[in-house]
Image (cartoon, helix red, strand yellow):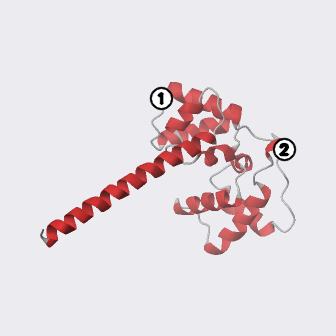
């Protein structure tokens, strides 16, 4: 067998192994993500339309009002989510029922003045405070969110990123599950 044929066969096997690994990985991710969404009318639709692009924790952590969920679903549709008008209503109903805001928002803690100032000057330019207050993300979630906003053009410097994430995660982090 020629060296060229041998290399092609090796390349074919490597590609087949990569495809197999990717399909196994995707199957595991989907089943794990399905476990993270509570059952109810709209759960399967959320898995089919939303969890295909991002993990369920992004949905679960948000805790938005019905109006907030409507804005969020409409934003996803504008960004290309294949959701019909009737499916949109089912999704909004499901999210609003299962991931509504929890009890009163905590007040900022002492020592957050720098992070709070960055938040007010950089974030509230585009967003209303209720969107931030309702998300209740973990520290890694807020880090991803701030990095995403920077990629999308938020004028947050590297020096401001840390204090901003600290402020957001301390004041708008997840609440205990028994505090629904």
Q: Quadrant of the N terminus?
A: bottom left
Q: Position of residue 177 (x, y in %)?
A: 79, 44
Q: Which of marks 1 and 2 precedes in the sequence? A: 1
Residue 41 seen in the figure: yes
Q: Is residue 88 above or below residue 56?
A: above
Q: Secondary structure at mark 2?
A: loop
Q: Quadrant of the C terminus?
A: top right
Judge from the rendering whether residue 150 lies leftward or rightward of residue 128; answer left or right: left
Question: Alpha-carbon neighbours of circle 1 within 10 Å: few (<14), some, or many (≥20)?
Answer: few
Residue 53 seen in the figure: no
Q: Secondary structure at mark 1?
A: loop
Look at 15% across and 69% down and name the residue there.
Answer: 4
Judge from the rendering whether residue 49 lies leftward or rightward of residue 108; answer left or right: left
Q: Is residue 149 above or below residue 53?
A: below
Q: Which residue is mark 1?
A: 84
Viewer-proximal residue, 47 or 19? Answer: 19
Q: Quadrant of residue 144?
A: bottom right
Q: Is residue 22 above or below residue 116?
A: above
Q: Which residue is mark 2?
A: 104
- Residue 159's disc is none
Q: Residue furthest bottom?
A: 159
């Amino acid at each position: 067998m020629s060296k060229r044929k041998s290399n092609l066969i090796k390349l074919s096997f490597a590609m087949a192994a990569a495809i197999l690994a990717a399909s196994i990985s995707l199957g595991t991710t989907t089943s794990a993500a399905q476990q993270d969404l509570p059952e109810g009318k709209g759960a399967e639709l959320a898995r089919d339309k939303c969890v295909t692009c991002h993990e369920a924790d992004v949905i679960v952590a948000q805790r938005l009002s019905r109006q907030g969920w409507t804005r969020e679903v409409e934003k996803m549709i504008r960004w290309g989510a294949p959701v019909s008008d009737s499916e949109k209503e089912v999704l909004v109903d499901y999210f609003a029922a299962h991931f509504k805001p929890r009890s009163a928002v905590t007040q900022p803690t002492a020592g957050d003045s720098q992070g709070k100032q960055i938040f007010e000057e950089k974030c509230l330019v585009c967003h209303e405070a209720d969107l931030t207050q309702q998300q209740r993300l973990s520290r890694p979630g807020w880090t991803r969110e701030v990095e995403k906003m920077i990629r999308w053009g938020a004028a947050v410097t590297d020096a401001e990123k840390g204090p901003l994430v600290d402020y957001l995660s301390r004041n708008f982090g997840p609440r205990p599950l028994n505090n629904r």
